[in-house]
Amino acid sequence: MKSFVRSLKSEAKTAITDPWHHSQSWAAHYHKWQFKYDSFNANYIIENGDRSIILSVPIRETNHHPSPQAWLDHWAKTKGKRQLEQGTKESLQPSLLDFKPQSSNCIPPKNPKGISFGQTLDQLYQGKTCTRRVWSDRTAKTFINYYEQGVKVPAYNKDLRYGGEIIGWLTLTEKPHQQPLVEMTQADLAAEGFPDYTFDQFINEFFDGKNQTVWVICFEFTPNENQESSVPVEVVETNDNQALSDTDELTYEEERDRLHLERKVERAFYEAGKALQELRDRRLYRSTHANFEGYCLERFGFKRRHPYRLIDAAQVFDNLIEMCPNWTQNENVSEVESHEASEDLQMCPNWTHILPTTEYQIRPMTCLDREKQVEAWTQAVELAGGKVPSHRIVKSIVDQIRERTPVPNPWRKGEVAMIMVKDNPDLRGKGGCWCVISEVHNFSCTVRLWDGNYQVKPENLKELPYSNDQQEEVRKLCDRLTKIYDPEMENTAKAVLGSLGRINRPWLTEFEERVLTFLEES
């Protein structure tokens, strides 16, 4: 027991998740590569296992690439292109990407591109036959060639830059083609692996707007044989060298280990949200990026809304555990303290043992106040039979609560507010714009922007710290912009009006005033 607590303390002090701080190996570009990290001298070295090429990575480069694999790929496309081509002719070591897929009559081309399914891995194994991607024409042309040549396409469990592995092979059943998202049908949602989703749910989960045109790739998935073969059962040996199967009763130490690991899984998205909140609030991205959204996209691959969703989900998670703080145990507590916490745990309601495991599960709850969030989660767990409820169950409970206890509309006619898009697709592109409230309804508001009127919910509006005089200046500016706006006007003029409609201050600079006056007089 004491050794276990000591190991937890050591883990908490030394655990580093950055891939640049872990030695690792992989195969790429027809060679085996070994990455070595020297924590004492802060050296970063990538070494070729079969050719004696040692690449010393400049420390500054680690800030520009998410992993050693990504840095190597960049080097291979620039400085190392000729060196790799020469070494490939001499090397007899094949790349993992050149292994001939099962039941395939063709050999994949050199370094074939694959498709990652990090966000839809479960759907892929459950029969997903189609995927939609925002690809460049050049990338799409590559996959069109694969289809015409009958080439098997590797399927990855996640992006190669983050350690993705081949989990199977895709046989393209149709020629990749472009399609607007608005033309999707219910059959398309089923082929994507989301038959229970609505169109809006699917768009909000994976794309930035329903007006996008994407590439459609249809396929048949053949998993690797070892993915569907027998599942190995882990055997743990006790001090008496007696093997225990997974059906035996757990010891007290094993039960605590299991609880500890389950809590780590549950808190994965929570820890990400808390970390993102601190990165945003302290502006720790300012040395390399001008804004938080750009930093998250380049560093983590997060789209614009995803970091904010994780932050909101972490706040909901905090609200849930505050109702019964003893449900979780400090990972570094003593055995006595742990036993006392276990006794307190039994005094809490059963539902507190079931906590969210993904951001998507509790996304609908972010629009509720703290007490209603707890009520919604309690009912969702009960409806799910004491298990972690799905997004669909949580959303249905939230909708019922909102209909039963509508939130009073706090806004007043004439007030100035900022638009918050959240999950309202009609406000796409209007995030951060100020607006003037022209009508107040029971559960919504009609607001006036530079290009017309919009119907929004109260949660789509954010209060601005403007005085009465400053709000009057914004109302006058809104009048001037709406008089100029014409749907038939040139796009350049619309862009100017749009930029004036989202300035974060209640006045215009001298230059902005001259530009607006020019538009008014032209």
Image (cartoon, rainbow, N blue to C red):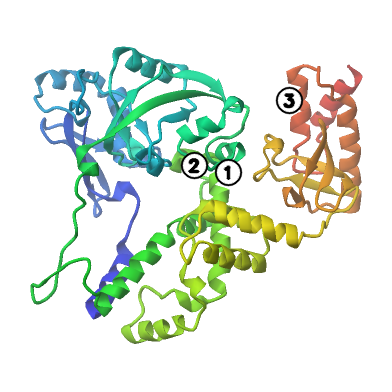
Name the secondary structure under disc 2. loop
Counting other residues with Cα less than 10 Å from the Cα at mark 3, is it few (<14), some (14-19), or many (20 or more)?
few
Mark identifier at residue 305: 1
- Above or below — where is 239 with respect to 50? below
Dividing the picture into quadrants, the one containing residue 99 is top left
| Left or right: 473, with 345 as reference point | right
- Above or below — where is 472 with respect to 316? above
Three-letter amino acid code of the residue under disc 3: Ala
Q: Nearer the viewer, mark 3 or mark 2?
A: 2
Counting other residues with Cα less than 10 Å from the Cα at mark 2, is it few (<14), some (14-19), or many (20 or more)?
some
| Front-most of residues 435 and 211 | 211
Q: Position of residue 275 (x, y in %)?
A: 48, 56
Name the secondary structure under disc 3. helix
**Which residue is the site of mark 2?**
302
Look at the image and tell me in which quarter the N terminus lies. bottom left
Counting other residues with Cα less than 10 Å from the Cα at mark 1, is it few (<14), some (14-19), or many (20 or more)?
some
Marks 1 and 2 sit apart, C-alpha to C-alpha, by 8 Å
**Which residue is the site of mark 3?**
495
Q: Position of residue 206 (x, y in %)?
A: 52, 37
| Front-most of residues 431 and 279 | 431
Name the secondary structure under disc 1. loop
Q: Earlier in the sequence, mark 3 or mark 2?
A: 2
| Front-most of residues 397 and 330 | 397
Residue in view at x 43 percent, y 61 percent: 266
**Visible residue check, residue 11:** yes
Dividing the picture into quadrants, the one containing residue 51 is top left
Marks 3 and 2 sit apart, C-alpha to C-alpha, by 26 Å
